[in-house]
Amino acid sequence: MASRTSGTVVVHPLVLLNISEHTTRTAAQSKAGSLTNAPLVCGALLGRQLENQAEVFLSFELKFNARDGGGPAPYELDDSHFLTRMDQMKQIFPEDEFIGWYVVGSSIQVTPGIAVLHQQIMRALPTALLLVFDAAFETGDGGAALPLAVYDTLPPTRVERVKLQQNFGAVSNESTAAVDYYVESASDDAIPLEIDTVWASHLVPLRISIDSGEAERVAIEHVAHVSRPTTMEIMLGEESVGGASSMVVAGQESEQNVPVVLTSRMATFLSSQRNAVDMLYRDITVLKAYVGEVISGEAPFDPEIMQLVQRMLCNRPVVQNDEMFDLAMMQEETNFHMTAYLANITTTASVVRNLALRSNAALSAARNKHQPYVNTNREGGMYDGSSGMSSMFGGGGRHARQRGFGHFR
Amino acid sequence: MDAADALKLFELDNNIVPLSASDEKVYCYDGQLQSDQLDQRPWRADPRYYRKVEISSIALVKMVMHARSGGDIEVMGLMLGKVVGQTMVVLDAFALPVEGTETRVNAHHESYEYMVQYLEQCQAAGRQEPVIGWYHSHPGYGCWLSGIDVETQMLNQKFQEPFLAVVIDPKRTMSAGKVDLGAFRSFPEGHIAAKSQDTDSDGFQSVPLNKIEDFGVHADKYYPLDVGYFKSSLDQRLMERLWRKHWVSTLSQSPLITNGEFTTLKMLELAEKINIFSKDAKKNVSAGQIIRESDAIAEEVSQGYASNMIKKRLFGGT
């Protein structure tokens, strides 16, 4: 049984989007035949490494040059390109360091080709992370996990050569837990090795979790829900009847073939919250089903999972009978009520003002109806109702004049 | 280990990547096609030639994150992309190491160096699109072009066409929970803007009082473009999977805390505007604007409050 992962890695969604874009671009270029470099999709990962948790914030593309003569390593990392780019990144993001690299393939296994390149990376950073992205993942409910695996490189130890060759035998589609990966590292000749052992580093899969900063979250949600998939129509700027001259104003969405749909911000916000709660509910149902099966004896008992479940149950309710918390909640509630009240007052004041203006205009025009109509647009342009009303009474004034009351003026 | 086998297992197999026909067209840069389109310089004949902008997913995420990271300081960067007919397509964006100050007409020398080097690196790594525009942030005061911005953009459009200006407001983005972004192009000097339907006399967002003069004076020197956002097929699939883990962030956000300061500022602004309005100095402030602003503030606060209540019910016990 494979050992349980000890460390976790936090991956930011921006990194995944970068990788996705790099893949799409390379595939598009390669199909169009305009690919200048080798058709590899690899890049560097930047972030921070603390104790046993690594966090990956950014990524950028790496350049590999085809090495002549083939041999075991057909591609070679372009060092100068890599160093220049690192320098540039450091200027903008001084806190992030090079912590690993990513490669895109058709599965999340570590293939021999990948291992060979990893050796090159290890020269620059012995404990580099390796992120393998599977571009061929299936959509639909079948796969729920993210199509990637992150491996941590442990310091080299003595490893039997047999084990090294074991992984490179059949790269099957079984779970990665069944296979232990080893990458041979440069051996130190001073230390004697037994026959059939080499210095190799064990690649340990890490547990992946996703986290995003505030701005990242808003942008990702936007990409997930508002962005449309590329279509030829979008790119050629062809809009059907509804879409033409509408701006993307917050709170409004306009779609092709549909007239402008006014979705209130509150509705969108609540529906996204509801989606999140839905996911929570689904997860809880799964856990409940699992616990039920363990009790009835159908499923194997897993102590780690049970521990997590129990901890979760004990943690709820998160806060109870905490004076300061209750006070803070009440303050927020009061703030909210006051703000809503103020907004209502403002709207009401405006309505009353409009009413006053109109009735004033009506009354004064009625009082002066025997006089020729005088333009009452003193109020200024922003209140449109007044001009409408005034012109109505203006018509009445003119009629009055025609009946010969004009000499009063 | 056979070298040929190693190669086969390693290189990207095109057939596995979900690539729609339009993906191919968008993400692959065709230099010849571009220069063909640009040779005729269609913007000279019609200053409003470019009507739409399409922004890719990573360009958007990078710009929003960069804008937010600046806090209260304006930040700026460049965008890479191409044109397709009357649409400008932004494919990527990168930050410039420039401090935001009031005088930004000429980018400093270090940032020119940085830019040139960065573009070289991009070309080497396989990204061939040229610079298509610049973006900068207006933290808290809305998406429009200030006087200096208009000057910069006019200069850019004289020498680097086609060029686009994008403005992002990170504070309003966080406050509203939606990306607040505007794309603009300036008119050439001396061009009189016809009063068309896109210049809304009320403005589609309210500008704080201390900037309102700047906004009004230059408002007719540029026009906004329609903004659309797109993502590739792979992006879309990835987003579906990502949502599986990402919903935690959505549920755990606390808008009241994140935006507390900004909300207070907005309310003070609004109070001032109401004062001005009631004292009869009606320039630049209208009743409709005031109502809209107060509704917006109330809505955002109630969203934050709703989020609090949801969390309390879920995790807080009775």
Image (tube, coloured by chain):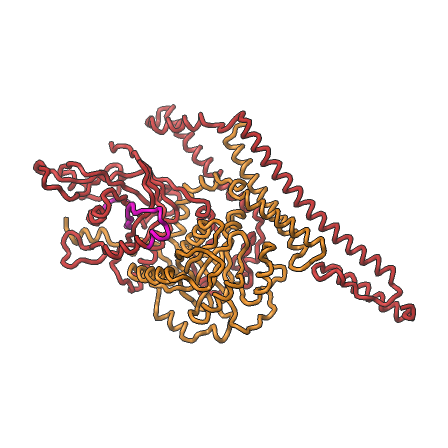
Q: Which one is nearer the viewer's eye here, A41 or B18?
A: A41
Question: Taking the image as drawn, is residue B206 in sight?
Answer: no
Q: What residue sits 51% from the left and 47% below the top? A: B174
Indicate whether residue A125 is drawn in magenta.
no
Q: What residue sits 39% from the left and 52% below the top? A: B235
In the image, which residues are magenta? A88-111
Instruction: Relative to B309, say whether B58 is above or below.
Output: below
Indicate whether residue A94 is drawn in magenta.
yes
Q: Quadrant of the C terminus of chain A?
A: bottom right
Q: Which one is nearer the viewer's eye here, A294 or A363?
A: A363
Residue A52: quadrant of the picture: top left
Chain identity for the colour orange used in the image: B
Asked if residue A198 lies left or right of residue B31, the reply is left
Indicate the position of residue A21 as horizontal and vertical percent values: 36, 55
Indicate the position of residue A329 as horizontal and vertical percent values: 57, 33
Q: What residue sits 56% from the left and 33% below the top? A: A328
Label count reads 0
Asked if residue A14 lies left or right of residue A358, the reply is left
Indicate the position of residue B89 as horizontal and vertical percent values: 43, 62
Residue A61: quadrant of the picture: bottom left
Asked if residue A204 lies left or right of residue B197, the reply is left
Indicate the position of residue A327 as horizontal and vertical percent values: 57, 30
Instruction: Relative to B158, say whether B172 is above or below.
Output: above
Chain identity for the colour red used in the image: A
Instruction: Relative to A14, say whether B217 is above or below.
Output: below
